């Protein structure tokens, strides 16, 4: 289920929900997954509450035994879409896939590239643009991506992409 707290006129919600279900299945996430697409202020509140990081970020993941929750910042998704020459929908799909992989237990901060390899394979299968992990690595060589912080290893506290 996708919950929208912000206005994104150019997004087909049924198509995005279909994509989310497919990404969930391919990532191997069992149970129910809810996706919140909200403003950066709301995402910052969640990041501060669960990760003690007082800044907005693009995507957060909160795993549960029976699925999980993903929270995405619509303004950051729009900005990144423009930055990487994508549509907002394409960027939302990249963020959804990344969040699903975190719900499946992957953690790119600690897994020696396992999540990056899995994300690359699924990205190719789903015909998606470059992954967040690839972007982070290329940007970290030259600058810092706005709204980025290190990933928490604690599932219940949430994970940032």
Image (cartoon, rainbow, N blue to C red):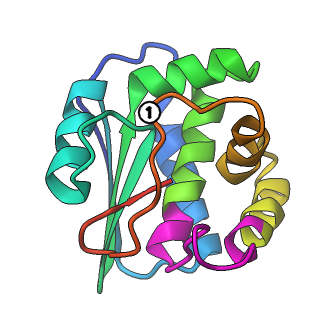
Residue at point 64% right, 79% down?
111
Q: Horizontal placement of 56 versus 137: left or right?
A: left
Q: Horizontal placement of 38 versus 159: left or right?
A: left
Q: Position of residue 46 (x, y in %)?
A: 20, 46
The residue range painted magenta reads 100-116
In this rendering, the answer to whether 68 lies above or below 93 is below
* Element class at badge 1: loop
Residue at point 30% right, 34% down?
55
Q: Position of residue 159 (x, y in %)?
A: 39, 62
Q: Is residue 111 magenta?
A: yes
In this rendering, the answer to whether 108 lies above or below 93 is below
Foreground: 114 or 13? 114
Q: Residues within 10 Å of mark 1 (few under 14, many from 20)?
A: some
Is residue 103 at least partly visible in the picture? Answer: yes
In this rendering, the answer to whether 99 lies above or below 63 is above
Is residue 39 at least partly visible in the picture? Answer: no
Q: Is residue 33 magenta?
A: no
- Marker count (numbered): 1
Q: Position of residue 94 (x, y in %)?
A: 63, 45
Q: Which residue is mark 1?
A: 147
Foreground: 122 or 159? 159
Q: Position of residue 42 (x, y in %)?
A: 20, 33
Q: Horizontal placement of 120 versus 14: left or right?
A: right
Residue at point 60% right, 33% down?
144
């Amino acid at each position: 289920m996708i919950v929208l707290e912000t206005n994104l006129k150019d997004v087909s919600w049924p198509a995005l929900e279909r994509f989310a279900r497919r990404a969930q299945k391919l990532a191997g996430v069992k149970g129910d997954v809810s996706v919140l697409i909200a403003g950066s202020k709301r995402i910052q509140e969640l990041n501060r509450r669960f990760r003690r990081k007082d800044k907005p970020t693009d995507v957060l993941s909160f795993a549960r035994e029976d699925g999980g929750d993903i929270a995405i910042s619509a303004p950051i998704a729009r900005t990144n879409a423009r930055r990487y020459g994508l549509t907002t929908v394409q960027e939302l799909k990249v963020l959804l896939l990344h969040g699903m992989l975190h719900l499946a237990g992957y953690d790119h901060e600690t897994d020696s590239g396992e999540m990056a390899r899995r994300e690359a394979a699924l990205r190719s299968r789903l015909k998606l643009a470059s992954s967040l992990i690839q972007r982070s690595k290329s940007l970290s060589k030259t600058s810092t991506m706005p709204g980025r912080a290190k990933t928490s290893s604690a599932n219940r506290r949430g994970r940032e992409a």
